Image (cartoon, rainbow, N blue to C red):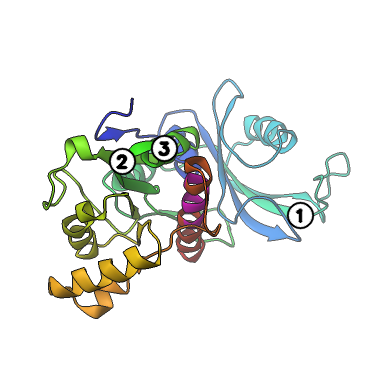
Amino acid sequence: MLADHTIETVHDEDHLALAAACQPGVGLCTIVGIEGSFSRRLGAQLAVLPDGSTVGDLADGCLESQLASDMMQCAQRRVVRYGRGSSRIDFRLPCGGGLDILLDPAPDRGACRAALEALQARRPARLALEGASPLLTRNYLPSLKLVVLGEGPELESVASLCSAMRIDVEAFSTDGLALGQAARNVCYDHWTACLLLFHDHEWELALLEQALASDAFYIGAQGGERARSDRTLALAARGIPEEKIARLTSPIGLLPACKSPRNLALSALSEIVGLYEEMRAAS
């Protein structure tokens, strides 16, 4: 059974290397230039531990091994070209592209800790990059969080998928909610999505009013055309301004008319993750 107010707090891929770099002896690698195509974004990072192991995610393993080896021999921060355009003829990237990577054997630990503390407090953070880097700062956003309120297998499927994808999720079933009242102990910020999954739509209005008054970047509610129309009229009758009601997404998800809880969970979460990734790309 799904427990109410279940929270799984996990650093996302952008924060793992930063957290490791707070520790003495850990080097930090940052992609500061990309030529051609590559599977990771500008600013992606990898931490190299004193034993040569790595934390983070840059490629398929071969690049990580090369970076770990190079970091062990790096006395001061410098930008190194890998792949296309590199003088190293013995190492090539499978994609055929070229990467400029800042190797920093001793990143500013205080700055790393300050950035990590800001992220843990759900605030954006920045880390200055030195060493002739063409990318002057590394910007971070707080990790994606999902607040899902509802009932039945749809709620359980969304919570389960979030857990599998290591997405922070707070799940509230009707057992932990009071009809006609806002949810207690819920905090929405600009990096939190709210998803309502009720078959009995009379549970929704107070919860939607609470979410629409917040900074949540996504607010969605399942339901057919009749439910959507009734919901809009009911919110307007409660005095919710039209521009706030327009923030509500319904139908939810990328796939039309999902017929199973698992497909609905995948569809809705895909939509939410896509919107969060757009924010992260623009940061």
Residue 137 visible in the picture: no
The one nearer the camera, 51 or 250, is 250
- In percent of width and height, residue 164 lies at 49, 33
The answer to which of 214 and 69 lies nearer the viewer is 214
The residue pinned by badge 2 equals 151
In this picture, residue 99 sits left or right of residue 134: right
Instruction: Find the distance from the CA under tag 1 to the CA under tag 3.
Output: 28 Å
The quadrant holding residue 4 is top left
Q: Residue drawn at (14%, 74%), measured in percent from left and top?
A: 237
Which residue reaches farthest bottom? 242
Determine which of the numbered discs, if any, sits on residue 11 in the image.
3
Which of the image's four quarters has the C terminus?
Answer: bottom left
Q: Position of residue 27 (x, y in %)?
A: 53, 35
* Residue found at x 59% / y 56%: 42
- Left or right of 98? Residue 259 is left
- Secondary structure type for disc 1: strand
Query: Does residue 235 lie above or below 187 as drawn?
Result: below
- The local secondary structure at tag 3 comes to loop
Counting residues from the N terminus, which is met first, the one under dot 1 or under dot 3? 3
Residue 267 lies in magenta, yes or no? yes
Tag 3 or tag 2, which sits nearer the N-term?
Answer: 3
**Which amino acid is tagged 3?**
His
The residue type indicated by label 1 comes to: Gly
Of 104 and 217, which appears nearest the observer? 217
Give the residue displayed 29% in from the left and 32% down from the top.
6
Q: Which residues are magenta?
A: 265-271
Q: Is residue 238 magenta?
A: no
| Magenta: main secondary structure | helix
| Residue hosting label 1 | 98
- Of tags 2 and 3, which is closer to the observer? 2
